[in-house]
Image (cartoon, helix red, strand yellow):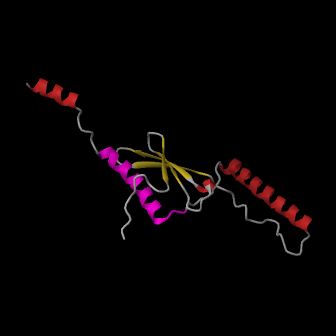
């Protein structure tokens, strides 16, 4: 069965009157959603993406072992958290940016709807609006 774009689109919510959309992650956590701003230009489509990214909070500088006491595990987890945050701050100060990544889970229907949003924006620039009735009448009067 072919999947076709939907109106309204599952997993895609239009925000306002211009090209901003919220794309919902299929996991159900709103913190994983992304917001996109799709704007057609002369020969391209600009897509700006806003997402909540997390640091490598799972990375351990101080190994938390099963043999450690409960209080020692807590101290090591806190130390790992502080270390990771300070590392991010250090790289932001030294390099001027921090490398992070994020992902979003889309079901097939959501992916098709997302692609349709981009296609519509791409076509929007190339479509010329039909002249209004007033425009047609004024051009007929000048031609006569």
3 versus 51 height, above or below: below
Q: Main secondary structure of the magenta part?
A: helix
Q: Identify the residue at the far front of this view.
A: 8
Residue at (44, 54) in percent of width and height: 9
Q: Nearer the viewer, residue 68 or 106?
A: 106
**Quarter containing the N terminus:** bottom left
Q: Which residues are magenta?
A: 105-126
3 versus 16 height, above or below: below
Residue at (61, 54) in percent of width and height: 30
Tell me where residue 142 sits by quadrant. Answer: top left
Q: Identify the residue at the far bottom of this view.
A: 67
Residue 58 spot, x, y in % from top left: 73, 64
Q: Is residue 107 magenta?
A: yes
Tell me where residue 103 sits by quadrant. Answer: bottom right
Q: Is residue 90 left or right of residue 3?
A: right
Residue 95 spot, x, y in % from top left: 66, 51
Q: Is residue 18 left or right of residue 60?
A: left
**Quarter containing the C terminus:** top left
Residue at (35, 44) in percent of width and height: 42
78 versus 128 height, above or below: below
Tell me where residue 131 sits by quadrant. Answer: top left
Q: Is residue 8 left or right of residue 133?
A: right
């Amino acid at each position: 069965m072919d999947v076709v774009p939907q109106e309204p689109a599952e997993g895609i919510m239009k925000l306002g009157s211009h090209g901003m959309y919220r794309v919902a992650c299929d996991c159900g956590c709103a913190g994983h959603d992304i917001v996109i701003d799709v704007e057609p230009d002369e020969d391209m489509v600009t897509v700006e993406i806003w997402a909540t990214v997390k640091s490598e909070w799972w990375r351990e500088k101080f190994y938390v072992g099963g043999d450690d006491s409960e209080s020692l595990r807590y101290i090591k987890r806190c130390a790992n958290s502080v270390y990771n945050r300070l590392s991010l701050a250090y790289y932001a100060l030294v390099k001027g940016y921090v490398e992070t990544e994020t992902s979003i889970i889309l079901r097939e229907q959501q992916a098709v709807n997302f692609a349709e949003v981009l296609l519509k924006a791409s076509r929007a620039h190339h479509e010329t609006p039909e002249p209004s009735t007033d425009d047609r009448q004024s051009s007929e009067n000048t031609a006569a």
